Image (tube, rainbow, N blue to C red):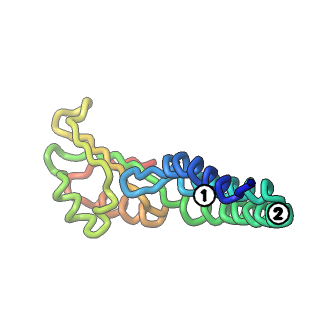
Amino acid sequence: MLDPSRDAAQVVSGIGFPGAGAILLRGEVVRGLTTAARQWSVAGVGLAVGGGLYTAAIGATVVRLLILAGLKPLERRFISGRQERNLQLRVERGSVSLETLRRMLGPGSVRVKQFAVQQSDEDPDLDDVQIALSRLTSSEFSAMCSRLEKMVGVRACRHE
């Protein structure tokens, strides 16, 4: 006797593991959700085709392609503008610490993902400070750079 629910159960079991494995959490960022959703939608279309529901399978495929094609420009516009940005400061020795940086940036200090200070190779009285900031638009980054350039002890500021 043919039982289509058993076939569907096997597809769900088979897709569940790689679908869940595609979703990763890195820091505050979740990666792989669209990959997992794509795997699930392809499995659903495959079940529809296997069950003889060709119209539903074609409709689901068209909707899926429209969503993926429509979301890409939105993603580029709103999400890719907020990337990690790096900043290098040359400061007087000991004038910049993580605490002074937090005071200067205020609420924006939560965007600091990396802060490294090392003695300058060129001048022992200066420090090279590297700061990695995340999830900033260009205007937010420019505003932070101008605030940091005005800090006491900052001699030079270079950003990417």
- Is 14 in front, or is 107? 14
SS assignment at label 1:
helix
Question: Residue type at mark 2?
Answer: Leu
Which residue is located at x 27 percent, y 44 percent?
129
Residue pointed to by mark 1: 37
Specify the amino acid type for callout 1.
Ala
Q: Which mark is residue 57?
A: none
Q: Nearer the viewer, mark 1 or mark 2?
A: 2
Question: Camera-side residue: 81 or 101?
Answer: 81
The residue drawn where x is 22% and y is 33% is 123
Residue furthest toward the bottom?
107
Quarter holding the N terminus? Answer: bottom right
- The residue wearing badge 2 is 53
Give the quadrant of residue 136. bottom left
User: What SS does tag 2 mark?
Assistant: loop
Q: Residues within 10 Å of mark 1 (few under 14, many from 20)?
A: some
**Image x and y of residue 28, in percent:** 38, 57
Q: Is residue 70 left or right of residue 109?
A: right
Task: Estimate the x, y position of residue 83 in percent, counting from the top left.
Answer: 48, 55
Residue 13 pos. (x, y %): 56, 51
Q: x and y percent of residue 16 in the render?
A: 54, 52
Residue 147 falls left or right of residue 8 = left
Marks 1 and 2 sit apart, C-alpha to C-alpha, by 21 Å
The residue at 30%/48% (across/down) is: 114
Mark nearer the N terminus (1 vs 2) = 1
Q: Residue furthest right?
A: 55
Label 2 crowd bin: few (<14), some (14–19), many (20+), radius 10 Å: few
